[in-house]
């Protein structure tokens, strides 16, 4: 999991002489190469009072030799001496061009560099970017997106494997991010809670459908409600039909796990259910076979991602509430959860469903 530090001095120094050192990844630009920043980081994570001049020379040479192109980043890996140990450092620079559709942060390139050089083990990512006020958010979230939140490999510790929404296992906060300019407490809270929301969304989208079904998705929503203090309403199975939600019921009625409509509601202090609110609605089809209009095998693979809308909004809801980003209006998130499965109860082409509004729709 990713955590952001206010400055290099806020990074955790080693507690003993034999403590393992993290990897360091410096991401800068031609205009802001970040040599001073990475030197501060090396000093802090090594626990030394000063950085060996040889280490500074190695870092300076590595940075000087970088040659990013308009479209591609450039990177180099070196080992630098820190006392009687060596520290693994990757220095990188972002592409020189920024299109009108991107930001000076070049977040796509930041994510790629983090995936390549910082996605395993303890890592410190140092970001030296132009126009800090305009770029730090995009770059910070690009780092979070570059760190995998789900792994179910038999030869490695599980990461984010879906259980019951409360006991899901996560690695410790082993990726720390620092900028060339200091962050305030408010900025830190916003970044850290948003990174948690990103990781929640990532692991739900990456989870296989035999783990993330409508039952476990509801459990994940209950976990978010518990963490945020939000009210939660769940309408499931035949109750959907009884209460008039014919569309969602029709999509999911053939599945082993019943469909569900989940609503989380957060009311900031001094607001109530009569205050004008914001509502987010997310599609949560945990698997879409196409139903009786069966998708061909090539088109069906990857349809576990059809719940990405609901996952994204659930993560966004958690981030917005915990970071106190919404203070004047209630916030609701509506998750429409179902598996479009095949079976005797599956909706048929030509069936007619009656939606909550009373509108009828022919399939």
Image (tube, rainbow, N blue to C red):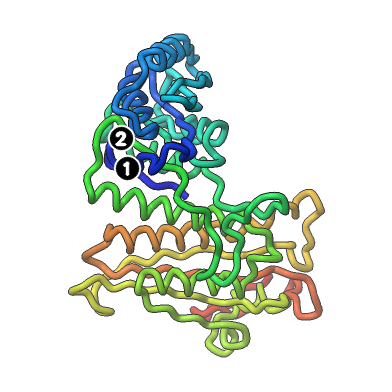
On the rendered structure, is 112 left or right of 13? right
Closest to the observer, 231 or 274: 231
Left or right of 190? Residue 153 is right
Please, is residue 197 above or below residue 250 in the view? above
Rate crowding at label 1 as few (under 14), some (14 to 19) or many (20 or more) other CA atoms within 10 Å. Answer: many
Residue 90 shows in the view? yes
The numbered dot on residue 5 is 1
Name the element at disc 2.
Answer: helix
Residue 200 position within the rendered picture, expressed as x and y whole percent measured from the top left: 49, 58
Q: Is residue 316 left or right of residue 119?
A: left
Q: Residue at x 57, y 88 (%)?
A: 239
Please name the residue shown 55% across and 65% down the image.
168
Is 176 located above or below residue 290 in the figure?
Answer: above
The residue under label 2 is: 8
Going by the picture, which residue comes out furthest to the bottom? 242
Please indicate, yes or no, whether residue 104 appears anywhere in the rendered image. Answer: no
Residue at the left extreme?
270
Say if 126 sits above or below 358 in the image: above
Q: Residues within 10 Å of mark 2 (few under 14, many from 20)?
A: many
Image point (28%, 57%), residue name: 325
At 44% from the left and 69% from the top, the residue drawn is 224
Residues at marks 1 and 2 touching, judged by CB atoms closer than 8 Å: yes
Q: Quadrant of the C terminus?
A: bottom right
For mark 1, give the secondary structure.
loop
Foreground residue, 351 or 34? 34
Q: Looking at the picture, how far across and down is residue 93, in whole percent?
A: 44, 21
Q: CA distance from mark 1 to mark 2?
A: 7 Å
Q: Position of residue 268 (x, y in %)?
A: 25, 70
Q: Quadrant of residue 178?
A: top left
């Amino acid at each position: 999991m990713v955590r952001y530090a206010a400055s290099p001095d806020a990074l955790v120094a080693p507690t003993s002489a034999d403590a393992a050192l993290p990897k360091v990844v410096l991401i800068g630009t031609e205009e802001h190469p970040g040599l001073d920043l990475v030197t501060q980081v090396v000093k802090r994570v090594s626990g030394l009072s000063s950085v060996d001049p040889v280490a500074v020379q190695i870092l300076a040479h590595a940075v000087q030799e970088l040659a990013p192109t308009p479209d591609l980043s450039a990177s180099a890996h070196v080992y630098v001496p820190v006392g009687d140990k060596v520290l693994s450092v990757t220095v990188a620079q972002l592409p020189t061009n920024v299109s009108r559709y991107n930001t000076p942060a070049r977040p796509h390139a930041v994510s790629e560099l983090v995936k390549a050089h910082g996605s395993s083990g303890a890592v410190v990512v140092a970001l030296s970017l132009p126009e800090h006020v305009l770029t730090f958010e995009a770059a910070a979230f690009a780092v979070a997106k570059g760190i995998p939140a789900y792994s179910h490999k038999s030869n490695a510790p599980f990461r984010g494997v879906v259980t019951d929404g409360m006991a899901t296992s996560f690695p410790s906060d082993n990726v720390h991010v620092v900028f060339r300019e200091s962050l305030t407490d408010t900025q830190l809270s916003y970044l850290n809670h948003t990174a948690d929301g990103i990781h929640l969304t990532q692991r739900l989208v990456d989870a296989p459908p035999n783990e993330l079904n409508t039952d476990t998705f509801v459990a994940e929503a209950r976990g978010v409600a518990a963490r945020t203090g939000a009210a939660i309403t769940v309408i499931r199975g035949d109750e959907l039909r009884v209460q008039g939600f014919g569309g969602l019921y029709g999509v999911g009625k053939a599945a082993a796990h019943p469909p569900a409509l989940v609503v989380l509601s957060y009311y900031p202090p001094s607001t109530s259910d009569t205050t004008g609110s914001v509502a987010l609605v997310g599609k949560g089809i945990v698997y879409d076979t196409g139903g009786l209009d069966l998708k061909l095998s090539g088109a069906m693979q990857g349809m576990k991602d059809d719940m990405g809308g609901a996952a994204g909004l659930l993560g966004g809801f958690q981030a917005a509430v915990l970071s106190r980003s919404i203070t004047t209006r209630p916030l609701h998130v509506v998750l429409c959860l179902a598996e479009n499965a095949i079976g005797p109860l599956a909706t048929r082409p030509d069936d007619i469903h009656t939606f909550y509004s009373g509108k009828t729709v022919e399939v």
